[in-house]
């Protein structure tokens, strides 16, 4: 768990929102009113989270949150009963937005869990606060569209990745995530790439050998 001296979560949240988050949002949707900014900040919570902590569990759509991963690494996954396997659908890192767009838009139950793979910080807003925010500030609806496009783009990339050879999967993964492999359990990476742990180790050893030549 991270400790930040005497600085309160509320103060840190306001600092992060005004200096980092709000400017990024305004680049996408245009200037926000002071009232809108105040509502966003009052509806969000800054949370320090620990390795292995669950930040979302599958369940009712109204219990879901939108999370901005300010620091740390997390993964989304689900358990498939018939095959008795866990599938890691995505690894999340700093500045990623963790949000089940389909669940929010279509009022469908969330099917995946999200768990931290190292200590970190989140800025979170709950389902109903987010719904009220979008109802009162329609220009922010374009953020939902942006996230839907991002998810579709990622899903296409991920399906392409899974159709590649093990070596190509690892190369593509490391190209987009050059430092993650040294920070988290490699079992998670193997699950994400849909390969065995031993096959990942062999491919990674060959990858490092090729890099040294």
Image: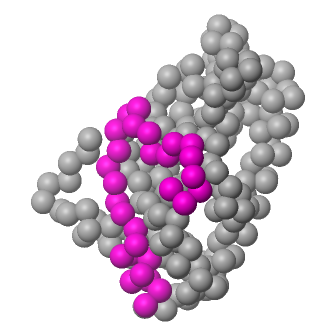
Q: Is residue 146 above or below residue 151?
A: below
In the figure, is residue 153 to the left or right of 80? right
Residue 207 seen anywhere in this rendered image of the structure: no
Residue 43 image point, x, y percent:
40, 72
Determine the residue positioned at 48% across, 27% down.
184
Determine the residue positioned at 72% across, 62% down.
106
Can you tell which quarter of the image residue 45 is in?
Answer: bottom left
Q: Is residue 143 above or below residue 153?
A: below
Residue 2 image point, x, y percent:
26, 45
Residue 99 image point, x, y percent:
59, 56
Q: Is residue 107 above or below residue 41?
A: above
Residue 32 seen anywhere in this rendered image of the structure: yes
Give, as a single range, the part of the protein colored magenta.
Answer: 35-63
In the figure, is residue 169 to the left or right of 183? right
Q: Is residue 62 magenta?
A: yes
In the figure, is residue 117 to the left or right of 150? left
Q: Is residue 14 magenta?
A: no
Can you tell which quarter of the image residue 87 is in?
Answer: top right
Residue 83 image point, x, y percent:
73, 18
In the figure, is residue 72 to the left or right of 191? left
Q: Quadrant of the C terminus?
A: top right
């Amino acid at each position: 768990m991270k400790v930040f001296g005497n600085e309160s979560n509320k103060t840190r949240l306001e600092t992060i929102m005004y200096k980092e988050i709000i400017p990024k949002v305004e680049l996408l949707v245009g200037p926000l009113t002071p009232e809108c900014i105040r509502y966003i900040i009052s509806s969000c919570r800054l949370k320090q989270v620990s390795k292995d902590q669950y930040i979302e569990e599958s369940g009712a759509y109204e219990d879901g949150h939108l999370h901005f991963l300010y620091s740390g690494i997390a993964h989304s996954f689900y358990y498939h009963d018939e095959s008795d396997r866990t599938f890691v659908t995505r690894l999340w890192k700093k500045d990623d937005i963790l949000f089940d767009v389909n669940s929010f838009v279509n009022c469908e139950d969330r099917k995946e869990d999200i768990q931290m793979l190292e200590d970190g910080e989140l800025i979170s807003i709950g389902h109903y606060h987010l719904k009220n925010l979008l109802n009162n500030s329609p220009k922010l609806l374009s953020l939902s569209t942006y996230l839907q496009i991002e998810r579709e783009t990622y899903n296409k990339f991920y399906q392409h990745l899974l159709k590649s050879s093990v070596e190509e999967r690892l190369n593509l993964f490391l190209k987009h995530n050059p430092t993650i492999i040294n920070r988290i359990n490699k079992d998670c990476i193997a699950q994400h790439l849909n390969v065995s742990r031993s096959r990942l180790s062999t491919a990674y050893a060959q990858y490092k050998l090729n890099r040294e030549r």
